[in-house]
Every structure is written in C-alpha cells, then in structure tokens.
Image: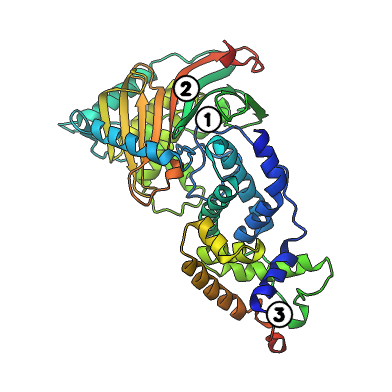
Amino acid sequence: MSDEDFLRSMFDAATRDLRAPEVRLRPRPTVVPLPTRAAPPARTWPRRVLMGGVAAAAGAVAMLVAVVGLGSGSTSRLRPVPGSGRPAAGTTAVPSGSAVLYQLASTVRALPVPTGRYAVQIEQQSEGPTSYLKASIVDSRTGDTWTYQQGPGVPSSLPMAPGFLPSEAQLQASDPTDPARLRAVLIQQASAGNPVVAQTANDLAVTQAVDTLWNPLVQPQLRAALVSVIASSSGVTTDPHATDSRGRRSIRISYDDAGLGMRLSLYLDPATGRVLESSQQPYTATADPSLAGKDVYMSQYWTDKSPAVNPLDH
Amino acid sequence: MAGFEAFVAEAGDSLFRLAVVLSTDVRAGEDLYQETLQRLASHWATVDNPAAWARRVMHNLAVDRFRSVRARPVEVAAPDDGAALPDPHSSDPLDAVEVRPALFRALADLSDAQRLVVALRFLEDRSEADVAELLGVPVGTVKSTTSRAVGRLRRHPSLTHLFPGNEAAG
C-alpha cells in the first residue's frame, strides 16, 4: 500500500462515522464576528464587518474610489485624545472633525429615550451587485430577533433567533455611558475573542464602537458615549458635510483598520447620531474581498406591535 | 433557497468531514460547518460554484480559528504506547474513534495550506488537478505541498509507525 492509499484509508477511518448536523441558519446580522477572531460565544457583540461575496470585489473598487474622493477637501484628521471622551483640557485648537463629533454626542445625549418594546430597523444590504431589503425586529427585553426580507435569492422570513442581540438591560449593564470607561470596555470586548490580527487598542476601540452604533437597542446616552469614544480616537477622518447614497445629510466617519486592510465608513444622522449607512471596503491588496459590503438604513422606529407583522408588507 | 437545501442534503456530510479535519476537532468542526453554511446561505444568489466557494470560505475561516487556538495544546488523547495505537486497516467500526486523535494530532502540526491540500487530496480523494483548480493554484504547487505534507505525516510520532513499511518501528 502506498503512502497515499494509506492516508486515504486513514482519513476514511477517522471520519466515516461523522454525519453533518442540522444546519441552523440564523438571521444574517448587520454585522458579523470578525473573521480574524476565534469562534465567538453565542452572545458576542456584533462586529462592523459585513459579509460579502467574491462578486463584491468589483463594487468595492468603485466604492473605494468614491470614498477616497470624499476623503479630500473638507475632511479633517482627528488628533488622538486617548480615552478621554472629550477634548483634552487646555487644548487650544480642537480639530474640527472631533469637534463635530463631540457636538453630535452632546446633541444625542439630550435626546429622549424612545418608548416601545420592539425596535424595528429596515435596511438595504448590498453585496456587490446583489442587494435586498431586510427588516429586523428586536425585542428590547430579550434580544430575540425576527427577520423579514425582500430580494432575489433570500427567503421572505427567517426563524426567530432567540437572544440574537444583547437585551437593552444587558446593554446597560455591560456598557457604561462614561466615554473613558466605555473605551476600556470596548477594548476588552473586542479583545475577548483571541484576536489574531495585530490590532492596536485604538483599532479595537474604534471598530467596536462602530460595531455597536448600528444596534437599534442602543439608547441615546450610550450612543453619545460611543460617538465620544470615536471622537477621542486617532486615525478617524470626519466629513461633517457628507451625504449618504440616498442623499441624506450626514456626518461621515472613516477609519482604516490596518489589521484587516479594510476601510470602515459610517454615515451618521446629525440630529440623532443613528447610523444611516455603513460600508466596509478593502483598501489593501491583501484584504479579504468577501468582507466588503454596504448597509443603508432606511428607517428605524420603536413599536409595541407583534413581531409577527412583517414591516415590509406596509 | 430550495437549491441551498438540496446542496446541503447532497454535500453536507462531506463538507462536515472537511470542517472537522480542518479544525482537527469535532466540536470546532461543527462550528466551522455552521459558519460556512451560514455564509453560503447569505451569498447563495451570487455563488456560481457552491462546492468550491464553500471550501474556500471554510478554509479561510479554519485558518483564522486554527491560528487563534494554536497556542493552546491540542485536545486529543495521548497514546500510551505503540501497542495502543490504532490499526487503520482494521474493519472494526470503533477504529474511527481510535484513529482520529492520532491523525488530528499529526494534522495539527501541518501548515494551514498543507492541511487543506492533504484533506482535499486524501479525505475527498480529489486529483491534483482538481485541487489546483479548486484553490486557484498551479498543479505543481499542489504536488509539492502534498509531497511535503505526506513527508511530515510519515515522520510524525503519532503516525510514523502506522505507515506502510514503518510498522516495525512502532
């Protein structure tokens, strides 16, 4: 018997009793765990990494060109003020980009807490040439998530995913609204999955804050703190006069994650700090193009209506 | 998604076995299998060749996960002595349980690329040309990778005495 035949018999003996378990599809999250980390625990924080197909690569190039174009002119590079959550005392010339974000945080902090049990978020998810509408209904008490979809190649609804997101109470318990403390918590959360890509603490803080901002259960106090964390981080570029792909007035935040080779772009509503659009595109040749993608958030609201009602039907 | 379900029904077991082999752990293989199919389902409408796509994605995911746990010891049973090691030629159905730790221990010491190529060549019984096409690399690369991997497996303490011609050394 040759070595190769021996190995075939060895592999066969080692695996012939294995049968595939039932596939448990969960709703495609707006954000998914970073591929650079170990398998996340079931209740891990979502990540601002979009799943995209190989077909997304061509679109990624166009998006990259667009982002680079936006990156000139009115944008400003933020100066690091690590962990402070606000401009350093005695600073005489606060960069305009961070000033815009601190002002946004102040605005958001004063917003009322919405009422209703369920947060509804309707978004358009794009991966290369393919896009579809997705409505997520999240129970603020449990994090249970119902998903409805419209588009080619996707089922119209998915089974309810129990505890898909942290509940509102869990969010409040885990995430302080003091920016300096929140920054430390975000770094800890992002580090929990045994990161294998060399990301700095600044990388982890920014990406985790960006990952968290989209969550519809994030209330104004926490959202304001997240914006402050981003404002206090280095490497963030801000365009206060941007518009998203739907023409909505936005504050655009960009950040290059060197570890992943991906450029994160986030368009925030200047009145509420909510995410209007987010995208992730490779900016290095070695980045994984399957991670490219874009989400456009069409609307977000709170309701007490049963999750059995499909918001996309109206 | 009917096509997806049919694909899983047809290819699920082989994909699962590949996931277990790439993970060198059954439980981690289950996670890898689920994550791979989750991604495949998300991209189903745009994927031309789901079998190849799933294998490439599975490999990428496996590399990330494998590297993240590499610092920790491989959780397989250590053989006590040569007499306790399995006979892969036996028809005893219990052999799967016996052989697996030894094989996985050896696979864990291969490089990511070697582990994938060996799995595609000998677990899935694919030709060198087929593996080359699947991975998008020259056939020569598959040949050299396979050769080095087989050499390492042949010399690995967990397997060396099981290879043909080496039995006496055990």
Residue A206 can be seen, yes or no: no
**Residue B61 pos. (x, y %):** 53, 51
Mark sitting on residue A219: 2
Q: Chain of mark 1?
A: A
> Tag 1: Cα neighbours inside 10 Å, few (<14), some, or many (≥20)?
some
Mark 3 vs 1: CB contact within 8 A: no
Amino acid at the residue labelled 1: Leu
The image position of residue B67, as x and y in percent, is: 51, 59
Residue depicted at 26% across the width and 24% down the height? A240
Image spot of residue B142 (x, y percent): 51, 67
- When the figure is inspected, residue B170 is found, relative to residue A293, above or below; the finding is below
Residue lying farthest front?
A: B129
Which one is nearer the viewer's eye here, A138 or B103? B103
Mark 2, mark 3: which one is toward the viewer?
Answer: 3
- What residue does disc 1 label? A171
Q: Which mark is residue B73?
A: none
Q: Of callouts 3 and 1, which one flags the residue occurring earlier in the amino acid sequence?
A: 3
Q: Secondary structure at mark 2?
A: loop
Residue A6 in view, yes or no: yes
Q: Amino acid at mark 2?
A: Gln
Q: Quarter of the image holding residue A109?
A: top left
Q: Are marks 2 and 1 in contact (CB under 8 Å)?
A: yes
Q: CA distance from mark 2 to mark 3?
A: 66 Å
Q: Identify the disc placed on residue A1.
A: 3
The C terminus of chain A lies in quadrant: top right
